[in-house]
Amino acid sequence: MDTRDLKAGQQAAVERMLNLNSPVLASGQWSEQWKVLIYDGAGRDIISPLLNVAQLRRNGVTLHMLLDSDREPIPDVPAVYFCRPTPENVKRIAKDCTDKLYASVHLNFISKLERRLMEDLARLVIEGGQVQSIAKVVDQHLDFVSLEPRLFSLNQKNSYAAYNGSSVSETSVTDTMRTISHGLFSVLATLGSVPMIRAPPNGPSEMVARQLCELVSQALKSGGAFSEAGSAMTSRPLVVIIDRALDLATPLQHTCTYQALVDDVLEYRMNRVTIDDPSAGGRKTYDLEVEHDVFWKKNAPRPFPEAIDDNSSELTRIKELEKEVKSKIAAGGGDVQAAAEAPISAESGTQELLATVDSLPQLLERKKKLESHTNILQAAMKAIAARELPVLFEAETTDRADQKGKLVKLLGPDGKGTLQDKLRLLAVVSLRGGEAGDLEAEIAKAATSPEEQAELEKGLEGIKHLRQMQGFNKQTPVTTNAASTSAGRGIGSWMQSKTAGILGQVQSFLAQSDDSYVTRVIENLCEFKAGSEDESFLTLDPKRKDPLVRVDPTPGSSGGSNSRSAPPREVLVFVVGGGCYAEYQHVQEYSKKHPERQITYGCTELVNGRGFLKQLSSLKDT
């Protein structure tokens, strides 16, 4: 396993759990012990991106059911439980034991089972007379969702509002930060690495950083989660914890990349997208995973029009290759071996065709994947055109003095975007320092129904919060001059889509730049730049008795844990208050330009523009 692949590490841990905490099975090997898997909603969300039904079956799981569902007894097989340690879950587990649903029970808690709940569980099981049914109790420390090898979320809903709501108590904020730090601890325990921790002083980032540092220090002293890792990596990684309030624009901005647009305009969750499919007479769900979908891995971070073109050219190539392979097989009398010895046309390429004859099923599977992306692209295109998203994206990323007239038109009743789109545009313009008074009057004209007027009022309250936070932070990290990664494809230019079934003119988006607040912070910290966050951010070392490190800012200084001579090669950047796919793709692009630096991106939750605007609009009521 690549020690830098967080998703692979979590999958290995889950497979160990499914094999009753025995070593992971070798590739192609099947478990000899059949069992049932019982999980709560959190456990399901963790496992869903890691293992499909076939992989669960290979690990001996014959049935998988929700903990709170009605379940029939299966007394001759063991049960593996995977759930959060909550009072409700503990009571249900004890009831299952009392009712003798399974031969034995292997309890695996997503995070640490506190002593009080452990005692409650023991008492309830003793009262039911079924102590012997519990085979094992394990704290798995897997309280995060791995979506890609270098992307994870703590899956904590409304995470920004949880500590910014007007009625949120100090105790509630402390509890929220503790939950976040425990989730981050799970990530580090899975990687088996003891990091250096950097965070801006004061606020939620410092709270999380200090609590995380304390958790790692305690684990080191007890020989727990990090006992097997001297470290798993050749050098200590750097964990950077950032508050969402330091860059409020990025999750609100409209974007241009395939993955970010799918998240914005379609139903996309846990690596699955659901779209309306008239041909199927309803709705259809597609899996989108970079590990198993070559097209998605290549095009998810690319501008949407480039994904359209690539889908068209790849589908045409695959269809032509399929036709020739089938023709070649038919020429051999339907015999694959005879087909492999038949003459091959020069156009298709000898080596490619020979390799494909014996793998026609894989070719057809690739074609099926491409056709699924055609359907997804069509669904996204429909929403993009209806809402004029390219025009909104251009308005948000262009800072010109003569733009006010255009903004008035986009925000008014003649603008095609939804009211949420218009509020997002107004929010970004406000953060950029634009005069919003007249623009608010225009957007008010677009809210015609009582429901829209109520939504507008809440949205404007959210924008007011943005201005207040920007005043506190005294910075505007809005990128207005994104550099194009596609020569000759500036915003406003038009291109002809060649994708089968998607004809007509499609506005070309300007490619996203890798210059964002998060990537600038990473650059400054890794390069030890003077006068930057490297001098203002706190540095914490869990291995030290006094974890606060006074870093010597002198370049090349050496000695002790405050040495500045070795820039970190592994970076984990984490955003408290929610992240987004656009920000993740900024980090991806930055990492490609700095191959010496491997970067993992995480956040309390992944939100799109609509979701983040909804949180901002609800702060007054939270």
Image (cartoon, rainbow, N blue to C red):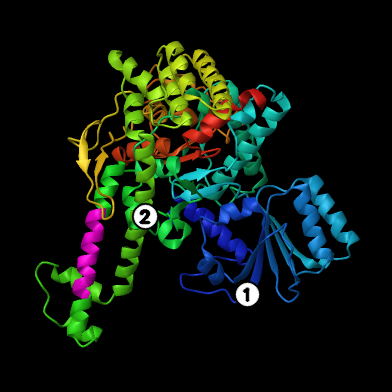
Up-down relation of residue 43 to residue 262 (above or below): below
Q: Which residues are magenta?
A: 312-325
What is the x, y in percent for residue 502? Answer: 28, 50
Residue identifier under label 1: 33
Q: Nearer the viewer, mark 2 or mark 1?
A: 2
Quadrant of the rendering where the C terminus is positioned: top right
Quadrant of the rendering where the N terminus is positioned: bottom left
Residue 49 colored in magenta in the image? no
Q: Residue 187: which disc?
A: none
Regarding residue 451, the answer to whether it shows in the image is yes
Farthest right residue in view: 127
Regarding residue 140, the answer to whether it shows in the image is no
In the structure shown, which secondary structural element does the residue marked by tag 2 occupy?
A: helix
Up-down relation of residue 240 to residue 350 (above or below): above
In the structure shown, which secondary structural element does the residue marked by tag 1 occupy?
A: loop
Q: Residue at x 33, y 38 (%)?
A: 589
Q: Residue 375: which disc?
A: 2
Distance from Cα at disc 2 to Cα at disc 1: 41 Å
Q: Residue at x 75, y 45 (%)?
A: 114
